[in-house]
Image (tube, rainbow, N blue to C red):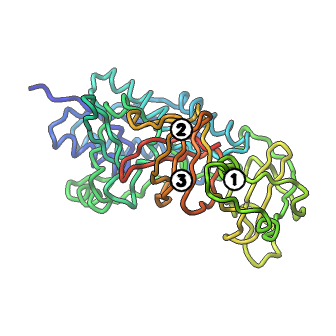
Amino acid sequence: MTKEKVVVGLSGGVDSSVAAYLLKKEGYDVIAVFMINWKENTGTLTAGCTWEDDVTFAEMIAKKLDIPFHVVDLSEFYRKRVVDYMFSEYEKGRTPNPDVLCNREIKFDLFMEKALELGAKYVATGHYCRREIVDNEGINYYRLLAGTDQNKDQSYFLCQLNQDQLSKSLFPIGHLLKPDVREIARQHGLITAERKDSQGICFVGKVDLPVFLQQKLVAKKGNVIEIPDLFMFKKIDLPLIPQFLDKLCSPFPYKPWNGKVIGEHNGAHFYTIGQRKGLNIGGYQEPLFVIGTDVVRNIIYVGEGKDHPGLFRHGLFIPKEDIHWVRPDLALNEGEERSFLIRIRYRQPLEQGIVFMKNDGIYILFDNKQRGITSGQFAAWYLEDELIGSGVIA
């Protein structure tokens, strides 16, 4: 019987190393491929190009497991599809999630194409999530489920995958806890067993974001305007009913005359909602937080304290063209609404809310106000532990 061929994205970390080990143990014909996606270090907070260390570790793991090892350079595509997208979004005053784009555009698109060219049936990664097949009225659908380890669940990062991509994907460690993954690596002599997890932007690493963004975005002086608590508290808190969806799900439209100028910044496009660092303005009892940005006027609006009402919103809106259903058979039709568990950033606890499908897009109202809802981020909605759909917040 011919073994099914699987290409595993071997990154040089412990998770993909154990994924490769488990696949070989299960009898798959495993091929390891390392992706070079970023070679530069402008703005990075590491001493050198970490991909060179990563590829060394990945090759040693492949030798240890006695599996073929290949390197594929996707850096040109990564720059165009992920990094240029980042620059474009920040320039518009939005905060993108490059990890979600990396998975949709690189790992499960271009990389998957390369894997299929090698004769693979599946692509496997070290993501902490699970995949199941369910029959709905005679048609098989692929379910994207949260990882068993709630502290490491990475299903959010895969919220833009489609059924075709999921049909060719395997997640060998999704049922395991992180300590168990490291223990498997130790027991079988994998040198990545104690290696630290990567941090920061996917394949780029930890960065000084303003320095990184200044590769393309020009610094320009602008005003920092403080919005007092009293101004926000005077605003009418609308009832949570569909008639007010538009206002409840939109950012507050701050104007320069709503507050007072308290300092300067180097460019509104370098800041995001909820940001605390980088303001460099003293004289306050509590820290200042960004509660709004205006890249047209080049203004940052700030509020004092982590509980400033300007940091919280009842809901969000996703334009029709930015809606994605992982499970198209469970998509809402226009005029329908349904309760879901919702996440607006990685590691955020799931929050209860109602998704309203309207002719112009999706409106989401949360049971409890959410802190730091930011344009450009991805919202993902779940039924229990299954990710059903996602979209880019307007």
Instruction: Residue under label 2, please give it.
Output: 335
Q: Please determine whether, in this image, residue 352 is positioned above or below residue 357.
A: below
Residue drawn at x 65%, y 48% is 243
Amino acid of disc 3: Arg
Amino acid of disc 1: Thr
Q: Please determine whether, in this image, residue 57 is positioned above or below residue 273.
A: above
Residue 155 drawn at (x, y percent): 41, 48
Look at the numbered disc 2 and give the secondary structure of its residue.
loop
Between the residue at mark 2 and the residue at mark 3, the CA separation in whole angstroms equals: 27 Å
Instruction: Residue under label 1, please give it.
Output: 272
For residue 188, side relative to residue 131 (left or right) = left
Q: Please determine whether, in this image, residue 33 is positioned above or below residue 355.
A: above
Mark 1 or 2, nearer chain start = 1
Residue that lies at the very extreme toward the left in this rendered image: 1
Q: Please determine whether, in this image, residue 32 is positioned above or below residue 376.
A: above
Residue drawn at x 34%, y 47% is 145
Q: Nearer the viewer, mark 1 or mark 2?
A: 2
Q: Nearer the viewer, residue 74 or 174?
A: 174
Neighbourhood count class around disc 2 (C-alpha, 10 Å): few under 14, some 14–19, many 20 upward: few
Residue drawn at x 77%, y 51% is 293
Q: Quadrant of residue 331?
A: top left
Residue 39 drawn at (x, y percent): 55, 38
Mark 2 or 3, nearer chain start = 2
Look at the numbered disc 3 and give the secondary structure of its residue.
loop
Mark carried by residue 345: 3
For residue 219, side relative to residue 36 (left or right) = right
